Each structure stands twice: as structure tokens, then as C-alpha cells.
Image (cartoon, rainbow, N blue to C red):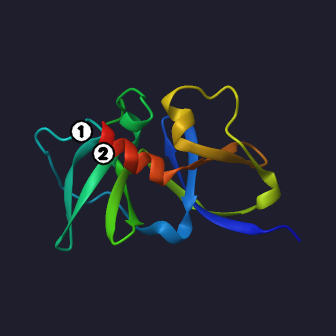
Amino acid sequence: MADRHQFASFFVNDLFFGIEVEMVQEVTTEARMTHVPLAPAVVRGLINLRGQIVPAIDLRRCLQLPESSSNEPPVNLILYTGDSCTSLLVDAAGEVLEVDQDTFEPPPVTLRGRPRELIRGAYKLPDKLMHILDLNEVLRNKRNS
């Protein structure tokens, strides 16, 4: 039997993503954000999560996608990042999916530029691809932008 992995899924623009479920602490839309002057462009602000200050990284900006035209607030995907937390701002949260390791493929050749650097690969699902985000690369992008 193939190895199975669980991913928390989410959407950014028309892309479908997954990140290891054990990295996700919570999902919220209720966080008030404080702008940080002179912060890298991908850092949209800081949120106060029960007394812990958490940077909010705009995944649209990381992927060099246009700003959302929706009036809906972004979803904060709160992730464990070592000894602290980081919020990824995404368009919508999906569900937890369990996938077989043998359906994993390297990033598609059609994916180019910055998005290709942030994606480890994709799992083939019956009706779409779930791109797996490379959180280490996203965090490196936060520091170097």
C-alpha cells in the first residue's frame, strides 16, 4: 500500500494548494492586521493572536499574482514555523485531504518564474492538481523581499 499524506488545502487566485496538515495551527478571518512601515512587500502586516505577534504573509504577492478583486477579507492560515507562528493570507480555505505518495509529481513544466520556486510539486487528484507549497522558500522570500 502506498504512503498516504494529509494536507490542509486552500485557494489563491485560481490555484489549488496544500500544506502539511501538522503545520496548521488554525484558520481564521477575524484577525485585525497592523501595517508595518518599511516591511518587505510580501509582509502585509502583523496580527495579534492571543498575545503573540504574528507576521501575515500575502501569498498572492509571493506568487506575483494580482491583488484580489473580491471584497471578502483574506483567510489567515496560521502555521507553526519552528518556535513561532506565521500567517499565510490566502483567498479561501479548503478541506483536509489525504493523498497517495505515488500521485506526487515535480512542479509542472508550464509553471514558470517565482511560483515555480515556491512549489515543491503537485499531487494529481481526480479533477485537479494540488500544488504543494514550499514553506521554507516562502519564509526565505519574506526575509529577502
Q: Position of residue 14 (x, y in %)?
A: 54, 34
Horizontally, residue 12 falls left or right of residue 112, namely: left
Disc 1, SS: loop
Q: Is residue 114 above or below residue 47?
A: above
Horizontal arrangement in the rendering, residue 29 relative to residue 118 (left or right): left
| Three-letter residue code for mark 2 | Arg
Q: Secondary structure at mark 2?
A: helix
Q: Is residue 109 above or below residue 32?
A: above
Give the distance between the C-alpha atoms of the residues marked 1 and 2, in whole angstroms. 7 Å
Is there CB contact under 8 Å for labels 1 and 2?
yes
**At 42% from the left edge and 44% from the top edge, which residue is drawn?**
91
Q: Residue at x 28, y 52 (%)?
A: 56
Amino acid at circle 1: Pro
Q: Can you see residue 14?
A: no
Residue picked out by circle 1:
40
Please name the residue that numbered disc 2 is placed on.
143
Residue 134 vs residue 131, the one in the foreground: 134
Q: Residues within 10 Å of mark 1 (few under 14, many from 20)?
A: some
Res 84 → quadrant = bottom left
